[in-house]
Image (cartoon, coloured by chain):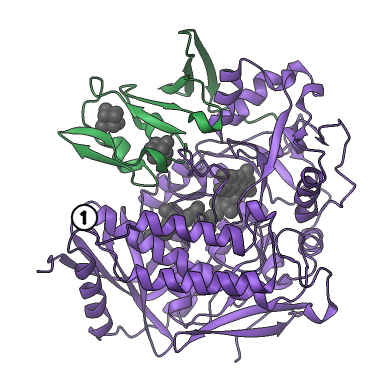
Chain colours: A purple, B green
């Protein structure tokens, strides 16, 4: 006998899926600029959900005095070897400073120099206290007139009819309730995907990873299943981080000036190039060639910086501070070992995500994407997520102004309800979701360029990976859950498996190595001019169709085909 | 990295359960219970939320943990980060939320 779940139907003008950085700021923008109703559906609680939970260390994307948004576009384009959407980069960069000012108004603390200007860190960063970034933003969203926040509501599927979005469906984790949310426009803001590959610490501390393990790629999966076009999933993001704690390195590298050294004490920082992927590649190479482990040389930055470094990490990655204290050695007494992380799919650092027009509308009418889930605009970081949330919100307001038609069709929703209720019929026969997740991570690690493969793969590996992930997708169909929290696990696994399939297909179709480590293709070790293109994909009739698109040159891009 | 909840100090307000970005904590006998110790991200949101210092966080042995625990008590603008080392020594670092990172 199937379990019977409660069923709530919610009507709103705008549905925002994911109350993270982009989602909360978009909600505030809609509220300030219109009288439209907004619902935020958030799987956790907007107070500390998503990337900003522990805090961030700086604003990584800011136009400092003497620089222009165009400079930013040039930098990000070079770093990604040309595979970017300059229209998206420019429109985001033009808003970096105004969204920062909006955050300062909400209470964000930003360091100022003697003249009262924001204190720059390098050419593009400013220093902040990022510990309470998210609570400040969440408070503004919660208090914004017309905004309703549904915490602990996890969305699983979009409702799309004739390529037009009509809402989404999901369930609440804390009680047995289905949420069917009908809307005039939907903003997808679920962040990127972690946990696809075997992580750095596969045992007890398996979730001590850089990207939030709770951002499982739901937004990508929902889009892929609904036939939205996606871009650049082969531009994986692999971070260079403090070993073990996987804490960010910017504060000790750019902030305190610690250099990258190998175990012989040699500075290898410039030997391999200075793009994001080359810095990582250098570290991988040094290790491969027997000169590891690699470090950030904090022992020469001076003990006067110790206290402030301990505090800075408490404001974003407290485990690193605990690690220093636990060892009884301050940063100046012990170099910090660094390592590459497992690969993530994250549109805020690299360019993977929805293929959007300049206003951030996806190829599905009425469906928008902002932040890490949205593609083509790498290195946009926290200010880019805010900027994209704002751009999407403003376009939604102008479109909904003209009115919209709600759909009444129940067939899709009914099929989903049946799916949830069938899964909730009790104990698993053989495998659990966690076991299949482990299997998935092992496959991706070994065959699709994970840590143990030094991020490398060849096409035979990828074919095997695809076959094996497809098998897991079949096994997924038999999974069962005993309660709503387990139901969440079952859907998180589905999201990851769907994203894995796309990652593998994209890696396979970029037959070159454009970025070391990010797509290190052993069958095609060099960059090939013929692949100065976007690799895109779109699901039709349950199969992924690959599309090569020419690099967009114009200032404005609109979907045509 | 994970957390440990002290049942004696817990008053069952469920603030930690609400805030956890991974929904890893559940209610059991009117107290908070860590349902998924291996799935903790170490964001310490729950530790900051608990007004009763009932939650400590620690590093797993696989990432260099040596038995120290940490919690946070918040007084106005000051966050007191309290570390109890395995030999019993206490270290407290105060961070003012109105001060920016210097690096
Ligand atoms: C550890 C870390 C440190 C960083 N440090 C910096 C820094 O110092 N400076 C900087 O500029 N940038 C930094 N970044 C990058 C920046 O924080 C992100 O790019 C940005 O916050 C992404 O915003 P987002 O809204 O796309 O995602 P998020 O803020 O992660 O929001 C996604 C939201 O969607 C929710 N969600 C996911 N799936 C579902 C679902 N199925 N249903 C409902 N809700 C769902 C999540 O719970 C979450 O709340 C950092 C990122 C990380 C991970
Ligand atoms: S916040 Fe503290 S007191 Fe409240 S339920 Fe959690 S552990 Fe218990
Ligand atoms: S530290 Fe973060 S992830 Fe871990 S239990 Fe607490 S709130 Fe959840």
Q: Quadrant of residue A475?
A: bottom left
Q: Quadrant of residue A230?
A: bottom right
Q: Position of residue A366 (x, y in %)?
A: 45, 79
Residue drawn at (20%, 70%) of the image: A422
Q: Position of residue A329 (x, y in %)?
A: 66, 17
Q: Position of residue A446 (x, y in %)?
A: 60, 59
Q: Position of residue A31 (x, y in %)?
A: 42, 61
Answer with left or right where residue A11 lies relative to residue A541. left
Residue drawn at (69%, 51%) of the image: A61
Residue drawn at (68%, 57%) of the image: A455
Q: Which residue is mark 1?
A: A483
Q: Disc 1: which chain?
A: A
Q: Is residue A38 visible?
A: no
Residue furthest left as drawn: A1
* Secondary structure of residue under mark 1: loop
Please determine whether, in this image, residue A90 is positioned above or below residue B66.
Answer: below
């Amino acid at each position: 006998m199937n379990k019977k779940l409660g069923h709530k139907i919610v009507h709103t003008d705008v549905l925002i899926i994911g109350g993270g950085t982009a989602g909360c700021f978009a909600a505030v923008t809609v509220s300030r600029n219109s009288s439209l109703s907004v619902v935020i559906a958030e799987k956790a609680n907007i107070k500390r959900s998503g990337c900003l939970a522990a805090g961030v260390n700086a604003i990584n994307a800011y136009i400092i005095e003497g620089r222009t948004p165009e400079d930013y576009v040039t930098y990000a384009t070079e770093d990604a070897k040309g595979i970017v959407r300059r229209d998206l980069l420019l429109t985001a960069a033009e808003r970096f400073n105004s969204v920062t000012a909006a955050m300062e108004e909400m209470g964000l603390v930003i360091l100022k120099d003697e003249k009262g200007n924001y204190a720059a860190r390098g050419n593009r960063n400013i220093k902040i206290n990022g510990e309470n970034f998210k609570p400040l933003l969440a408070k503004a969203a919660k208090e914004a007139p017309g905004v309703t926040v549904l915490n602990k509501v996890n969305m699983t599927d979009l409702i799309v009819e004739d390529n037009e979005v009509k809402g989404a469906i999901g369930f609440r984790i804390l009680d047995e309730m289905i949420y069917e949310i009908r809307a005039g426009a939907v903003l997808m803001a679920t962040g990127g995907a972690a946990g696809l590959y075997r992580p750095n610490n596969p045992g007890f501390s398996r979730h001590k990873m850089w990207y939030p393990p709770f951002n499982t790629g739901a937004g990508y999966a929902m889009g892929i299943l609904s036939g939205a076009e996606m871009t650049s999933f082969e531009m994986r993001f692999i971070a260079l981080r403090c070993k073990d704690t996987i804490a960010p390195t910017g504060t000790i590298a750019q902030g305190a000036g610690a250099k990258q050294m190998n175990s012989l004490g040699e500075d290898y920082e410039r030997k391999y190039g200075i793009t994001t992927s080359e810095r990582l590649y250098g570290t991988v190479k040094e290790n491969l060639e027997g000169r590891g482990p690699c470090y950030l040389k904090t022992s020469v930055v001076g003990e006067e910086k110790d206290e402030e470094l301990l505090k800075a990490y408490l404001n974003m990655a407290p485990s690193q501070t605990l690690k220093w204290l636990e060892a009884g050695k301050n940063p100046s007494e012990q170099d910090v070992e660094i390592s590459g992380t497992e690969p993530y799919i994250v549109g805020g650092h690299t360019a993977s995500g929805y293929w959007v027009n300049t206003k951030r509308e996806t190829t599905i009418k009425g469906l928008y994407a902002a932040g890490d889930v949205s593609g083509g605009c790498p290195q946009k970081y926290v200010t880019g997520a805010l900027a994209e949330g704002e751009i999407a919100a403003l376009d939604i307001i102008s479109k909904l102004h003209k009115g919209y038609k709600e759909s009444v069709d129940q067939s899709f929703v009914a099929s989903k309800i049946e799916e949830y209720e069938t899964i909730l019929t009790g104990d698993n026969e053989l495998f659990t979701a966690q076991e299949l997740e482990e299997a998935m991570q092992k496959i991706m690690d070994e065959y699709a360029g994970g840590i143990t493969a030094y991020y490398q793969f060849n096409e035979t590996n990828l074919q095997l990976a695809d076959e094996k992930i497809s098998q897991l997708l079949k096994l997924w169909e038999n999974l069962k859950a005993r309660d709503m929290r387990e139901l969440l696990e079952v859907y998180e696994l589905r999201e990851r498996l769907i994203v894995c399939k796309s990652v593998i297909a994209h890696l396979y179709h970029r037959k070159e190595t454009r970025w070391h480590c990010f797509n290190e293709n052993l069958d095609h070790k060099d960059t090939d001019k013929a692949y100065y293109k976007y690799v895109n994909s779109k699901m039709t009739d349950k199969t992924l169709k690959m599309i090569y698109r020419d690099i967009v040159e114009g200032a404005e891009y609109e979907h045509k085909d | 990295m994970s957390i440990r909840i002290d049942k004696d100090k817990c008053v069952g307000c469920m603030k930690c359960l609400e805030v956890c970005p991974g929904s890893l904590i559940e209610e059991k006998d009117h107290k908070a219970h860590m349902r998924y110790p291996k799935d903790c991200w170490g964001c310490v949101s729950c530790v900051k939320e608990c007004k009763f210092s009932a939650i400590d966080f620690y590093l797993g042995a696989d990432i260099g943990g040596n038995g120290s625990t940490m919690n946070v008590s918040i007084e106005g603008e000051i966050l007191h980060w309290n570390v109890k080392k395995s030999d019993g020594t206490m270290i407290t670092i105060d961070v003012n939320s109105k001060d920016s990172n210097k690096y």
